[in-house]
Image: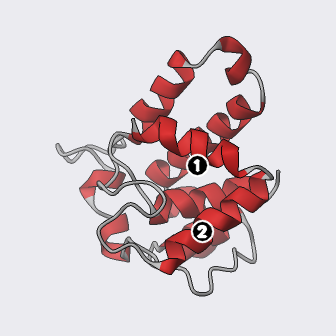
Amino acid sequence: ADSLLPLLVWAVINTPMPHAFAAVDFVKQMSPREHTCSELGYYLACLEAALAYVVDATEDSIGSQRHSEPLTPEGLVASVVPGGINTTGLKTSLSPSEMQSPEIGTSESGSSRPSTELPANDLFGQAQDHTQGDDVAREQLATLLMEERIVDDLVESLTL
């Protein structure tokens, strides 16, 4: 459980989807009650927490030791887990400038209120340049969750 949230933060950063909060909320509202109170509910809550963390990520929320460093995907993951996650061979799809773009950090009006829309790419390797890194990330997440079926159901539900 301690490594699930950092891995989901990494997955959200590297495989964002449009209207992420709306997709998670839709899955929660349309799933039968017994599913949202079981393991799937736990995974949805963790995914929602990861989305909220990435959207709310600012230098102030990450901690004082990060104030002088640029906001990067690695910095976000390191702020959740002090040693980070082994991402050798994995591709990142967001540059630091994209992480600080208005799409993630603020609304289009420039207010400090976070936007709920992340840059548009499909989840888990459906982007235009599908690479082996996406497959490795999906495999690591499936291994962590112990059942690839849960990951596939969650991805299918979120991409509908």
> Mark 1 or mark 2, which is nearer the start of the sequence?
1
Residue lying furthest front:
149
> Taking 120 as reference, is 115 above or below it?
above
Q: Residue 5's x, y, as percent?
A: 69, 53
Q: Which mark is residue 104?
A: none
Q: Residue furthest top?
A: 33
Which kind of residue does numbered mark 1 sit on?
A: Ala
Say what secondary structure mark 2 lies in: helix
Q: Residue at x 62, y 86 (%)?
A: 88
> Which residue is at the front of the view, 74 or 68?
74
Q: Nearer the viewer, mark 2 or mark 1?
A: 2
* In this picture, residue 156 sits left or right of residue 111: right
Q: Position of residue 145 (x, y in %)?
A: 76, 51
Identify the residue position indicated by label 1 in the image.
50
Residue in the picture at 65% in, 35% down: 45
Tell me the quarter of the picture where residue 122 sits: bottom left
Instruction: Provide the residue designation for mark 2.
Output: 137
In this rendering, position of residue 29 left or right of residue 97: right
Residue pictured at 51% horizontal, 46% vertical: 51
Estimate the x, y position of residue 104 in percent, counting from the top left. Answer: 34, 53
Colour setting: secondary structure
Q: Residue at x 44, y 49 (%)?
A: 55
Rendered position, 58 above or below 112? below
Say left or right for 97 vs 34.
Answer: left
